[in-house]
Amino acid sequence: MSRITITAALPYTNGPIHIGHLAGVYVPADIYARFLRLQGHDVAFICGSDEHGVPITIKAKKEGVSPQDIVDKYHAIIEKSFVDFGISFDNYSRTSAPIHHKTAADFFKTLYDKGEFIEEVTEQLYDAEANQFLADRFIIGTCPKCGYEESYGDQCENCGTSHNATDLINPKSAITGATPSLKETRHWFLPLDKHEAFLREWILEGHKKDWKPNVYGQVKSWIDDGLRPRAVTRDLDWGIKVPVEGAEGKVLYVWFDAPIGYISSTKEWAEREGIDWEPYWKDKDTKLYHFIGKDNIVFHCIIFPAMLKAEGSYILPENVPANEFLNLEGNKLSTSRNWAVWLHEYLNEFPQKQDVLRYVLTANAPETKDNDFTWKDFQARNNNELVAIFGNFINRVVVLTHKYFDGRVPKPQDLLNVDKETLENVKHYPKIISKSIERFRFREASQELMNLARLGNKYLADEEPWKVIKEDESRVQTIMYIALQIAAALAILSEPFLPFTSNKLKSILGESKLDSDWSWQGITEGRELLSVGHVIEKGELLFSKIENAEVDQQLAKLEASKKANEAANSKVDPQKEEISWNDFSKLDIRVGTILDAKKIPKTKKLLALKVDTGIDVRTIVSGIAESFSADEVVGKKVTVLVNLAPRELRGIESQGMILMAEDEAGKLVFVNPDEHSKLVNGLPIS
């Protein structure tokens, strides 16, 4: 069997994990790792927290704490979330660990000593107000490719293009909002152009057929556009210090530092396990796979391979199966706008439903294009597939086995053609599912697993043991024996996709008390999984329905986030110039009654009102027609500013103003003097 190293993109510790991260990286990577272990491969599944990114320093500034406080907080949340969700990392490390600082610094020094860097004095963007150079995400401006006005200095989140901060149009400092100036600074660059021929041969010629089209296409575009030197150091005070003389105040660029985190995490794991780490990164027979999102393709397919090639002793990735983005209820996921489903919150609000989210994210995985997560779809897939198909089949099998045979696996009698065909079909599923997983088609694989459950349901529905038992118990023995073998196959094959469900089902079926070979190969070879006479446990429901109220609660949370964002981003007119008490006392505000109202033709908003002000009856034109009909306002008591200078509107002289307010929902309401105030000398007082 093969030795395989699997890496999952290091999450930034500037916030928790959300469903976009899970769908794009961690669920598919975990399915692949679990699958390979089941096939007997030697797997190292590696990840860790990326703690040196500029977003972390921005978060720290906003919260008034140190970057270390930020990374400690979110590293703990992320690590616990992964454990509780069942992501089976062999090691989850962090880039603040001493072993990583040494590994990354040593890697840089090796390339430095080999002359693999070029040193240049260049002009970089500088914020004079903040008294610092602006690295990457400290700069926001217009993307030079797509025109998106909030592109970061290293990458546009709208079109995915990577660029240098100096390429931005109308750049602004994310710290002060000031327009930065150019100032000279010295940095070290990795000359990607030097490695262009190698990358072209290795990727464009060597992986054209086996890499996903989205990955290959993005890399080809970059290479065809011509590669340029990329800075590997930054002017920052947070990160790994550049280990050479004359580099004071400089740290390793996070995209040089972060992928080395895979190596340092492997070292940490190997040291704990008492094994050698090097074969997992340096043995030519080892296969390396990077699971990432599409925004990280360039870094994992061009920059990191160029680094490994320049160092000289490391293997290169066999494949980089990057996914596209997952949206939420039709909108792009956003940490800053709290438009997300956070994993740690989901685990609290949907206890014991880890596998439901795993299944939904896999069944709707953004493998070839951006996909959308909706709570209604989440509910439907749980209720209509996991509960109604998978769970229903298992429940039927367990209940009927206990009802008819006291929980014992019955001895099959003569097999009919339908029995033989069903058993033969079951034998094919390990190969079908394996083929999909090996091509990184996890969505397809999950549906094949569900098809096996459908096969079991159809078999029971067609053979109707609850009817046959009245006439031919021996026939029911055969039916239930075959149904139990299907249930056991589901317990085995579901493990990569639904690990908690698989363990629960294995426990119900009493797998630990059996000597039989519970393996994918055993299913393929048609071995007996549950032997005659074996006693299974009494059942419990594998899945439960998700009710409308639970979904409505999640939608309400998102709506609250939406309103909070709208309020935070709404532009409020500045306060007008102060007025004196004498100015205010000039206002003559009285209570009036609307006697008549008519819609003004060819207008959307205007009503012509006849108002009895107590001193006269006058005409007032009011822009309230979109909120109230003419009939609706007649008889209303209103507050009127009566000494406003007349003004002609649509040929009608308006002789005052009706005072209105907005309620909490933003709807116009009349200022009712009987409810809100008393009037003294034409002025309202509380």
Image (spheres, rainbow, N blue to C red):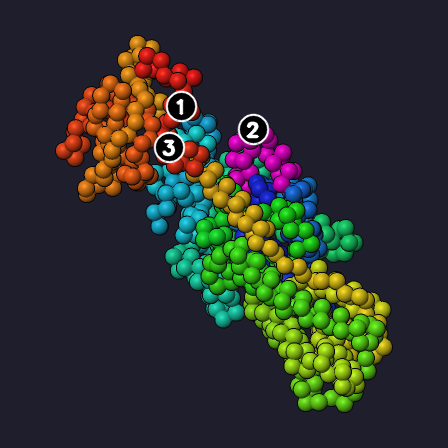
Task: Label 2, secondary structure: give it.
Answer: loop
Q: Is residue 412 left or right of residue 421?
A: right
In the rendering, at what x and y percent does residue 48 appear?
Answer: 64, 48
Among numbered discs 3 and 1, the one appearing first in the sequence: 3
Residues drawn in magenta = 53-74
Residue 404 in view? yes
Say few, some or many: other residues with alpha carbon within 10 Å of mark 2 (under 14 / 14 to 19 / 20 or more): few
- Identify which amino acid the numbered label 1 is placed on: Asp
Which circle marks residue 64 in the picture? Answer: 2
Say few, some or many: other residues with alpha carbon within 10 Å of mark 1 (under 14 / 14 to 19 / 20 or more): few
Quadrant in which residue 519 is drawn: bottom right
Say few, some or many: other residues with alpha carbon within 10 Å of mark 3 (under 14 / 14 to 19 / 20 or more): some
Q: Nearer the viewer, mark 2 or mark 3?
A: 3
Task: Label 1, secondary structure: give it.
Answer: helix
According to the picture, the residue beneath numbered tag 3 turns out to be 669
- Residues under labels 2 and 3: Cα distance? 41 Å
In the rendering, at what x and y percent does residue 664 appear?
Answer: 44, 34
Q: Is residue 71 magenta?
A: yes
In the rendering, at what x and y percent does residue 617 appear?
Answer: 22, 24
Among numbered discs 1 and 2, the one appearing first in the sequence: 2
- Identify which amino acid the numbered label 2 is placed on: Gly
According to the picture, the residue beneath numbered tag 1 turns out to be 674
Q: Is residue 384 left or right of residue 225?
A: right
Above or below for 301 versus 423: above
Which circle marks residue 615 in the picture? Answer: none
Residue 308 in view? no
Q: Quadrant of the N terminus?
A: bottom right
Q: Residue at x 30, y 24 (%)?
A: 592
In the rendering, at what x and y percent does residue 530 appear?
Answer: 79, 75
Q: Nearer the viewer, residue 194 or 113?
A: 194
Q: Is residue 613 magenta?
A: no
